[in-house]
Image (cartoon, rainbow, N blue to C red):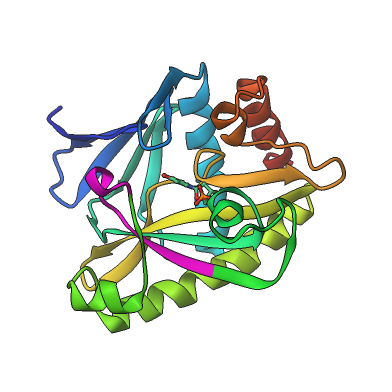
Amino acid sequence: MEKLYEGKAKIVYATEDPKEVLIFYKDDATAFNGLKKDTIKGKGRYNLAISKIFFDHLAQNGIKTHMVDVIDELTMRTKKTEIIKVEVVVRNIAAGSLCKRLGLPEGLELKKPILEFYYKDDALGDPLVNEYHIETLGVATKEELSEIATQALKINQLLQEFLKKRDLLLVDYKLEFGRFEGEILLSDEISPDTCRFWDKNTRKKLDKDRFRQDLGQITEAYEEVLKRLSY
Ligand code: TMP
């Protein structure tokens, strides 16, 4: 299979169908724009299984995603979208870069979700941008961005409800969208690599912050998220 692209956590391969690709989920993990690197045993398998559960749930609720099917425990077949170079972050509870930037205490419940856009460019370290930058620089049109924002907030409602039933708080998360045959599809992955999940009662971190902050029990946390989503 022809390798089309290798990222930090996934590899994209061509298929016999020019409109579809295979995405292989790696165990590799990076943080701080690639400065910290390691392998998290089992991560690829957990992230794929978790992403599949979320994509299925969202698709059942009217969100169009790039997922076609799952080939094996490390490989997802998806539509070959043209990725829009915007990382969309939605925050419900203050954590991570929001706390650093604005001096907020971690764990502060936000009165309303905060939506942020980052320009997807590793060389620039994915800088925070707004609608004006995105539109003026031609990264996405105003209409595309408006649809992306609507979808990101609808996804927030759906995922928060889904996770609450499983005693998980959706602190924040990052989404990516792609263009495909005139539509915008939710792309990339939704996993403990790209979300912050806390246990609702103990607020224990069950996501990649365990790797970023050297908290240990990383695989166990990913496994726990999958276990809770599976019932
Ligand atoms: P942040 O607080 O570091 O800005 O992260 C916000 C959310 O986005 C968090 O759930 C982790 C996720 N994220 C990614 O998926 N990829 C990234 O490169 C970064 C920086 C954050």
Q: Nearer the viewer, residue 26 or 207?
A: 207
Expressed as whole percent of the image width and height from the top left, the position of residue 147 reads: 39, 78
Q: Does the magenta-highlighted stretch encompass residue 9?
A: no
Q: How many numbered marks are there?
A: 0
Question: Would you place residue 167 above or below residue 180 in this image?
Answer: above
Q: In this view, does 142 lie above or below 195?
A: below
Q: Where is residue 96 in the image (x, y as percent from the top left)?
A: 58, 48
What residue do we see at 22% from left, 73% from top?
Answer: 182
Q: Where is residue 38 in the image (x, y as percent from the top left)?
A: 44, 18
Where is residue 103 drawn, in percent x and y? 63, 57
Residue 31: image quadrant is top left
Name the quarter where the N terminus is drawn. Answer: top left
Q: Does the magenta stretch include residue 122?
A: yes
- Residue depicted at x 68% and y 42%: 229
Q: Give the range drawn in magenta.
A: 115-125
Q: Quadrant of the C terminus?
A: top right
**In the foreground, 74 or 109:** 109
The answer, for residue 230, to whether it is visible in the render is: yes
Q: Residue at the spot x=57%, y=57% of the render?
A: 98
223 or 75, which is in the foreground? 223
For this rendering, which residue is in front, 136 or 142? 136
Residue found farthest to the right: 201
Instruction: Locate residue 16 relative to residue 9 in the image: left or right.
Output: left
7 to the left or right of 99: left
**Does 179 appear above or below 169?**
below
Query: Is residue 127 shown above or below 215?
Result: below
